[in-house]
Amino acid sequence: MNTISFTVVVPACNAANFLERAVRSVTEQRYPRCRVVIVNDGSTDATGEVAAALAAENPCIYVIEQENSGQLLSRTRAIRYAQKHFADENNYFLFLDADDVYLPGSLARIAALLTEHGCDLLLYAVEQTDEATGKTRPFGGSFSGEPASKAAFYQTVFFDYRYNSLCRKAVSARLIADRDFTPYGHLRNAEDLVQSLDYYRAAARVCFSDECFYRYYINSASVTHSLTLSKYPLDSTARRLTWELLAEEQVWTQAQTDAYAAFLLRLLKNKIEAICLFDAPSAEKAAAYETLRQDGFYRQLLTMAKRRDRVLTLFEQGKYAAMERALRLSRVAGAVRRRIQPDRKNR
């Protein structure tokens, strides 16, 4: 008999229109050993009332009320609550965003995979549905099965951003220490990766599945119009903490470490290019560039560059106008190459 139990953590901030759909995607699966812990994270809409109504009809639903603290601290609050009140020996945590759902039958299948592989950390595929268009597409990953080593595991998760999300992980309670994440409570980007690092470090056996258990809803129309430069994430905390974990674990060769440094520099260049593309005043863009340039971790990375990229060189020198010109030229050259390549194939 399968003895695995689940605690599903649901942070909810102003999610009154979605919360019931999310929670019922769990409870309607009728998995016999499952609890849902909802954290009403300082909502100003009817989220608290919806959560209370759900809890009133199902004794396996618990609600925590708190002032707005963000997803990272909401999740850790729910984990602490579960560790204090639930004493299941074989408990796994699942993480559900309040506007997403688990697909039917997912919990039983996740439990079967955990039992089959004897793993304390399972990473699985998700799918994305655009609520504006109704179109759904898989959002998988680059690997399936059990990694051959810790080095291979880190190679998979740290080079593929698709694995950052906690919503695609089943995490054994044994991996979760009582850690204070308050210093990172300000994060509104990559906080899932920050929380995952402890689980990666502690995991004794990991398995990846290409089966899809979770649906992530996006609204492309609202996303397109909501992101402004003032809200664009500039913080390097998640990458810095990842780098520190790798330095501590020392499971990679120097070549792998150098490759990851180069990968992080490409991500930095992507951030610079994204800032350049914003429709914002030059002074606001310059302030964003300067925030990145003065970041201690990014400065450390720039000293490790094996090749001197012109854009990054100009960025390091603080020559932002020349850097933007180089970026524009690079984009034009890339567009020309993309137009020429099909013609070459047809010759």
Image: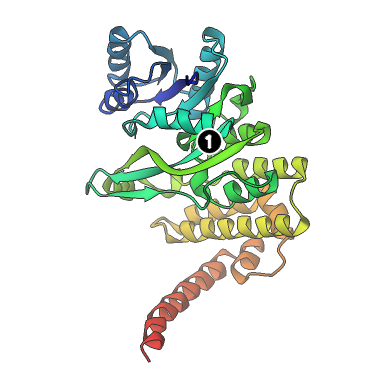
Q: In the image, is 95 to the left or to the right of 296?
A: left
Q: Does residue 70 appear in this view?
A: no
Residue 192 % position (x, y): 52, 36
Check the picture and name the quadrant holding the C terminus.
Answer: bottom left
Label 1 belongs to which residue?
122
- Between residue 273 and residue 119, name the one nearer to us: 119
x 45%, y 35%: residue: 167
Residue 29 % position (x, y): 32, 24
Residue 279 % position (x, y): 38, 57
x 70%, y 40%: residue: 245
Residue at the far front: name it: 1
The answer to whether residue 153 is above or below residue 7 is below
x 48%, y 76%: residue: 329
x 40%, y 20%: residue: 42
| Mark 1, secondary structure of its residue | strand
The answer to whether residue 99 is above or below residue 314 is above
- Kindly identify the amino acid type of the residue bearing the numbered disc 1: Leu
Q: In the image, is 57 to the left or to the right of 72?
A: left
Q: Residues within 10 Å of mark 1 (few under 14, many from 20)?
A: many
Q: In the figure, residue 88 lies in which quadrant?
A: top right
